[in-house]
Amino acid sequence: MRLALVAPVIVLATPLLAQQREFGTLGLNLRVGGSPAVGVTWRASPAVVVRPAVSFAWNKTETPLGGTNETTQYTVNLDVLCRTASWNRLISYLGAGGGVGNISGSGGLAGKIWAARALAGAQLNVVDRVAVFGELGFEYVHGEGFQGKRAALQTFPIGIVVFFK
């Protein structure tokens, strides 16, 4: 009699347990601060995460003399992250990435931009399907024309990930 009650529970619970093992493999992420970015977090393996993202920024300033300056920037980024350690709900990782984009502005200012970065970060799983992350890294940015070149140690914006499965 007990087996008749326990067997259906085991049969029904097995697919749920299998889903739990794959939980957190695909998610939507949003970086806030600076130039916000929207992307996808995909766990390719237990130790490697691939994170493509796009960002867009538009800025318009008016001068006291009636002039207007307007700039538009969009970039496409790709980061590859490797898990280094985990403690309960906290995961640390190292990564490398880069991006390409375009900047255009009033007065004929326009050009392409590319960047390369190395980063270290941590992700905290707040609840089952939501995590927050923050990163510190070194980034080199190369822009055409008026944008110039820049290398900096910086904090990258804090982000949030909502996992679908």
Image: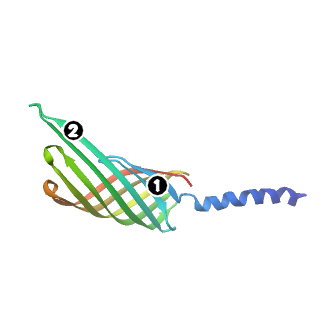
Quick check: 25 left or right of 154?
right
| Residue under the point 30% across and 61% down | 137
Q: In which quadrant will I find the N terminus? A: bottom right
Quick check: 65 left or right of 138?
left
Residue density around tag 2, few if under 14, some if 14–19, many if 20 or more, within 10 Å:
few
| Residue under the point 30% across and 55% down | 155
As helix, strand or loop, the secondary structure at mark 2 comes to strand
As helix, strand or loop, the secondary structure at mark 1 comes to strand
- Total marks shown come to 2
Query: How far across and how far down the image is residue 91, in percent?
Result: 46, 61
Residue density around tag 1, few if under 14, some if 14–19, many if 20 or more, within 10 Å:
some
Query: How far across and how far down the image is residue 154, in percent?
Result: 26, 57
| Residue under the point 16% across and 43% down | 106
Query: How far across and how far down the image is residue 141, in percent?
Result: 22, 60
In terms of image quadrants, where is residue 147? bottom left
Name the amino acid, label 2.
Lys
Q: In which quadrant will I find the C terminus? A: bottom right
Name the amino acid, label 1.
Leu
Q: Which residue is mark 2?
A: 60
Quick check: 105 left or right of 47?
left
Q: Of tags 1 and 2, which is closer to the observer?
A: 2
Judging depth in this view, the residue of 131 and 162 nearest the camera is 162
Judging depth in this view, the residue of 28 and 20 nearest the camera is 28
| Mark seen at residue 124 | 1
| Residue under the point 29% across and 59% down | 100
Query: How far across and how far down the image is residue 27, in percent?
Result: 49, 54
Q: Which is more N-terminal, label 2 or label 1?
A: 2
Quick check: 149 left or right of 54?
left
Seen as rendered, the residue at the extreme front is 108
Q: Is residue 65 above or below residue 120?
A: above
Q: Is residue 123 above or below residue 104?
A: below
Q: CA distance from mark 1 to mark 2?
A: 36 Å
